[in-house]
Each structure stands twice: as C-alpha cells, then as structure tokens.
Amino acid sequence: MSDFWSAWVLVLTLGCLAFISFVLFSTWKVQRKKATEETVGHEFDGITEYDNPMPMWWIGLFLGTMIFSAVYLVLYPGIWPGKFDGILGWTSRGELKADQEKHARQYQPLFDQYAAKSIEELQSNPKALSMGKRIFLNNCALCHGSDAGGTFGFPQLNDHDWLWGGSAADIEATVLNGRNGQMPAWGPVLGEKGVRNVASYVRDLSGLTVNASEEDLAAGKAAYATTCAVCHGADASGNKLFGAPNLTDNIWLYGNSQTQVEYTIRKGRNGVMPAWKDILGPQKVHLVSAYVYSLSDKDKATQ
C-alpha cells in the first residue's frame, strides 16, 4: 500500500478513535451522576424515558474496546504498515512465509518421493492419489467439477475422451503448460444454410436424429470436406495435435443440439486451459496428473 493510503487509513483510524472518545467523555461529563425518577420529556404510546446516566458497565465495556484498539495498533502493523510494523513485528507476508516453510518441511519429502516415480507407478499408491485429489479439488474442481464430470465448455476428465491426448505424458503436459483451443468462426465462409447443413451432417455422424434431407446432408458433407476435415480429419475422428474433437462419438463439449452445434460452427469457440506449472509447481502437477490419469481408466489404479 502506498504512503498516501497508509496515511489516509491512519488518519481515519485515529480520527474515529479521538471522535468517539470525545463524544463518550463529553456525554459522561454532563450527564447525571445518580439515577432519578425524572424523564427526558419524551413519550411514545405512553412510554417515557428516564433521564438516568449511562450504566458504568457499558462505559467500562466501551473503554475496554478503545484500550484494546490502542494496544492492537501498538503491537500490530496498524499505524503505518511498512514503516512501523508493531512491537511484535507481525506481517501477513511473514505469516504466509512461515506457513509455507512449515508446509515444505512437512510435505516436501513426500513430493520429492512421488516426483521420482512415474505417473503409471503412482496408480498403485493410494496416498499419492489422495494428495493429487486434494490438489485437484482445491484448484481444478471449479471448472471441471468436484467429480471431474465437467461442465458446459469444460471437459469431463473421468471418461476416455481426450482433446489433447489421454496418456500420462499428455495429461501432465496439459496441466503443466495449459492448452489453447481455437475453433474458427465459419459463419462468414459457409453462410447460414452451409452452417445448418454442416451441423446436421456432423450430428448425423454421431448418431443423433437430424431433421435434414439427404441433399442437405450431402451438401454438409461436401462443405465439411473443404473446411473442417483439415483439423477434425476426413473421417471426423478428431486430431489430438490440434485439440480438435472427435465428431463421431456423441461427446460434445458445448452441447449436441442443432442450435448449439450451429452456434459453434457459426461463431467458433475459444477454450483456454491455464498453465499450472508456475502456480502449483512441477511436483504438485505430477500428483494431480496422476490423479486425473487414474480417473480415466479405473483398471489402471490396480495395475
């Protein structure tokens, strides 16, 4: 925080404390010292208010909070962080560093041990997979779901369908470096009828019911061959090199309805998987990759 904002917070804090102290003591000074039967003159629905002094327990409690505030500002960095960090010298950065060092002392030997083993070897280690699962839940579940079942636009990770490859090495490379998938917008090239025909054709390939004539399907096939086959393949089975999905298996990242498929072709899609190597580090990536790899084939975990 800059010196200006530190000074601003300091002025507000001390100013509020001074104002509250002034109000409390000036009110206490002029009020009655003993209880009385007199009222302040207000009446509402037959209820009147006695003109009695503030209870001493209330004043004591109020003074206690003010004393606590003053002591806190002296012990901790509340007066001018960065210039006076309090008598105790506590800082959030220092506490974070201490927690990280404690975490490293406790878990680093395990991370080193598991990093020396291949992902395939870790499939038979329940403790390693459990650690990978916790890492997944804390970092990956927001997009892919706590059960790795995926959500709209985010792949399911517990099946056998992989845009960029499902081998142990492919999964670890994806988590480490991220992926940038790009489906170009073909609407301006194909036109609305062309978009509709291609959407019907690829949906028909995956076994879905389509409302299109044989002529339209043939036109969609021809348009597919000239625009889509270079990425998805002539047989529409996909290409992991580009992250181009298989269009014949009825697994759809953005939905398989005619409307959704037409939208994808017309507008394109841009999927981004962030790189986690700088956030988690290679060792944690290794563990979470082992966990994700175990989800894709339950038999691997027992081999």
Image (tube, rainbow, N blue to C red):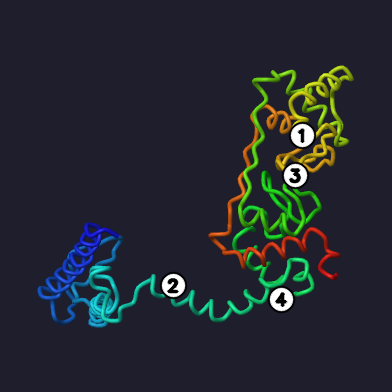
Q: Which residue is mark 3?
A: 240
Where disc 4 sits, the SS reads helix
Which three-letter amino acid code belongs to the residue tagged 1?
Ser
The earlier-in-sequence mark between 4 and 2 is 2
The quadrant where residue 86 appears: bottom left
Residues under labels 3 and 1: Cα distance?
24 Å
Q: Which residue is mark 1?
A: 257
The earlier-in-sequence mark between 4 and 1 is 4
Q: Residue at x 82, y 35 (%)?
A: 236
Please identify the residue farthest to the front as the structure is shown: 116
The earlier-in-sequence mark between 2 and 3 is 2
**Quadrant where the C terminus is found in the figure:** bottom right
Which three-letter amino acid code belongs to the residue tagged 4?
Lys
The earlier-in-sequence mark between 3 and 1 is 3
Q: Position of residue 3 (x, y in %)?
A: 22, 60
Residues under labels 4 and 3: Cα distance?
31 Å
Residues under labels 4 and 2: Cα distance?
26 Å
Question: Of circles 4 and 1, which is in front?
Answer: 4
Determine whether, in the image, residue 271 is placed left or right of residue 33: right
Determine whether, in the image, residue 79 is placed left or right of residue 233: left
Q: Name the foreground residue: 16 vs 240.
A: 240
Which three-letter amino acid code belongs to the residue tagged 3?
Lys
| 13 in relation to 171, above or below | below
Res. 96 mark: 2
Q: Name the foreground residue: 120 vs 262.
A: 120
Residues under labels 2 and 3: Cα distance?
41 Å
Res. 127 mark: 4
